[in-house]
Image: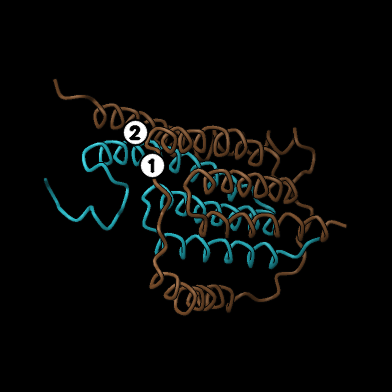
Chain colours: A cyan, B brown
Amino acid sequence: MVPTTHYLVLGAVLFGIGALGVIVRRNVITMFMCVELMLNAVNLTFVAFSRMLGQVDGQIFVFFVMVVAAAEAAVGLGIIVVLSKRKDSLDVDQIDQLKW
Amino acid sequence: MELVAFYIFAAVAVASAVVVVLQRRAIYSALALIVCLGSIALLFFQLGAPFIGAVQVIVYAGAIMVLFLFVVMLLDPASEVFSKNRLRALTFVGVPFAVLFVMVLTSTLGGFGTPPMAIPTNAMDQTVTVARHLFREYLLPFEVTSVLILVAVIGAIVLTKRPN
């Protein structure tokens, strides 16, 4: 039997790595992927607690987190495609105007 | 034995996460993220959540990551340049702060012990339990997420429509 704390620590480590990636990277798509990494770390924490408490509610919340992540990825990537076609660059530091 | 399996899955997840963050080309980051999602799905299976593990593989690694790969291949991003200053900032400020962040996150963890076998470990029973809760107590959020997906589809189409 694996203690629950192991899963929680792993979730925290993955969340920290994802947060580091969002801050350090400049490519918009890679930043998006690091956000997905953070969401997955949270999913892992939810399922670990669901297992510890013996309830299934944590897994249902993971279901909803996945749905929201899918919707967010679809709209966000649409925005990125349009943005890169206009600006011809995927560098976040160059997207610095509200309206062009 | 389960502990050994956990450490293997955890090592693969952390290693591929580090590759996602540090790799210069976006396509390699995407492939590493698929590996990470696969190892997290294995952890879900080990935690007694086969339905969520299967949904993770099908939806996350199978649909969302394919969407990412489409966009990466469509836009063909150039290799990101890690300037010397940024590498220096990463090693001397970024990584210590990330370590500090993780330590703060885990500082309040007590020993939670090993979990009881309360969730039925038969995959069929477990899926039935999830479905039972999803369509009774959580019916409203379920229907709201369907509206959310509709909004996302409309938004994606409106955003990428060519102005005639």
Q: Mark 1: which amino acid?
A: Glu
- Specify few, some or many for label 1: CA neighbours under 10 Å numbering under 14, 14-19, or 20 or more: some
Q: Mark 2: which amino acid?
A: Ala
Question: Residue B105, how many percent across, how many down?
Answer: 54, 73
Residues at marks 2 and 1 touching, judged by CB atoms closer than 8 Å: yes
Q: In the image, what residue occupies the spot 63% across and 60% down? A: B14
Reading the image, the residue beneath label 1 is A72
The outermost residue toward the right is B1
Q: Quadrant of the C terminus of chain A?
A: top left
Question: Residue B67, how many percent across, how many down?
Answer: 46, 34
B73 to the left or right of A13:
left
Q: Chain of mark 2?
A: B
Q: Quadrant of the N terminus of chain A?
A: bottom right
Most foreground residue, A6 or B124:
A6
Q: In the image, what residue occupies the spot 41% across and 40% down? A: A73
Above or below, B161 relative to B72: above
B11 to the left or right of B92:
right
Q: In the image, what residue occupies the spot 66% across and 76% down? A: B110
Do the dots labelled 2 and 1 sit on one chain? no
Total labels: the figure holds: 2
